[in-house]
Image (cartoon, helix red, strand yellow):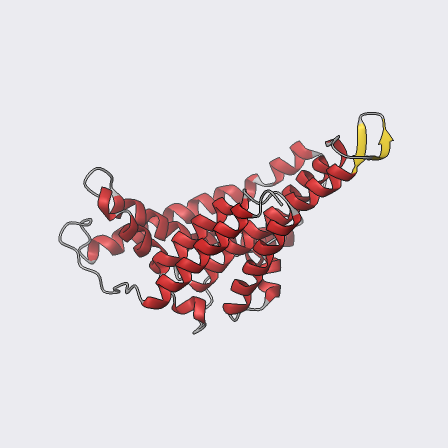
Amino acid sequence: MANQLILGRYLPGNSLVHRLDPRMKILAMIFMLAIIFFANNWLTNVVLIAFTLAMVLATGISLKVFIRGLKPMLFLIVLTVLLQVFFTTKGAVLFRLGPIVLTTGGLENAFFILIRFVLIIFISTVLTLTTSPLDITNAIESLLAPIKNIFPVHEMALMLSIALRFVPTLLDETDTIMDAQRARGVDFSEGNIMQRAKSFLPILIPLFISAFDRAYDLSTAMEARGYRGSEGRTKYRLLYWQNLDTVMLLGVVVVGALVVGLRQW
């Protein structure tokens, strides 16, 4: 389970994407996630696929890592695609069985939905794999700095940093606990849904205890180091916006404008 989760996994490197300012990468990701929903035909999807693959290659990380990130979402992707295939009535009818109808429009919509899921996961993964959780939270804090007087920006960034840091750790602990339970004869695949849900109770209790112990240790360590919130704090790691970041962000905007302009083709 933990090995399949890409969220919070950072792979150090010196690629073009690694060297970009994290603020630029966050702005580009948000913009691209919005633009994806404007793609409504084959041409706009080809543009987005080409741009996303270019970004993936620019990270210097194997494509297999990105594909592995699809596995936790595979059930939702397949379910959504099947609903589009069999319950969309637009286009010529290819097959009909009661309320289930297979049409050319349904196949086309299903393919577009599949591409949309893959692009969203890939674009998000580009950010998380090439940017450390600390840089992500520092970038978010910097971007939200104009509203820090009305919103606890630093505290929110701190919570996000802790969450990104410890989600993989908690999943590793879940795998360890499940292996220990299997060694004691527990089978998590037996019985109906209710019985399977009950079999997970022996996992949740030690996992919650471990999470609370870890939270207590973390809070003690922060207090011992004099943490008192954002008041008077300075940054050890400074963010620098370079000309390359401006060029890349303009490139993302051009891609977005191209997708919007090709919507009518």
Along the line of sight, the residue nearer the viewer: 154 or 163: 154
Relative placement, left or right, of 222 versus 60 is left
Q: Is residue 105 visible?
A: yes
Number of marks in the rendered image: 0
Q: Residue furthest top?
A: 98
Relative placement, left or right, of 68 versus 213 is right
Q: Residue furthest bottom?
A: 14
Residue 196 picture quarter: top right
Quadrant (top left/top right/bottom left/bottom right) for the C terminus: top right
Q: Is residue 186 visible?
A: no
Check the image and report above or below for 193 versus 220: above
Along the line of sight, the residue nearer the viewer: 56 or 200: 56
Check the image and report above or below for 40 versus 8: above
Residue 226: x and y in percent read 17, 55
Relative placement, left or right, of 127 versus 135 is right
Q: Residue at x 20, y 58 (%)?
A: 225
Q: Residue furthest left?
A: 232
Residue 261: x and y in percent read 53, 47
Check the image and report above or below for 255 versus 60: above
Q: Residue at x 44, y 70 (%)?
A: 16
Relative placement, left or right, of 179 versus 93 is left
Q: Residue at x 62, y 59 (%)?
A: 67
Along the line of sight, the residue nearer the viewer: 174 or 163: 163
Q: Residue at x 65, y 32 (%)?
A: 194
Residue 106: x and y in percent read 74, 37
Residue 99: x and y in percent read 80, 25
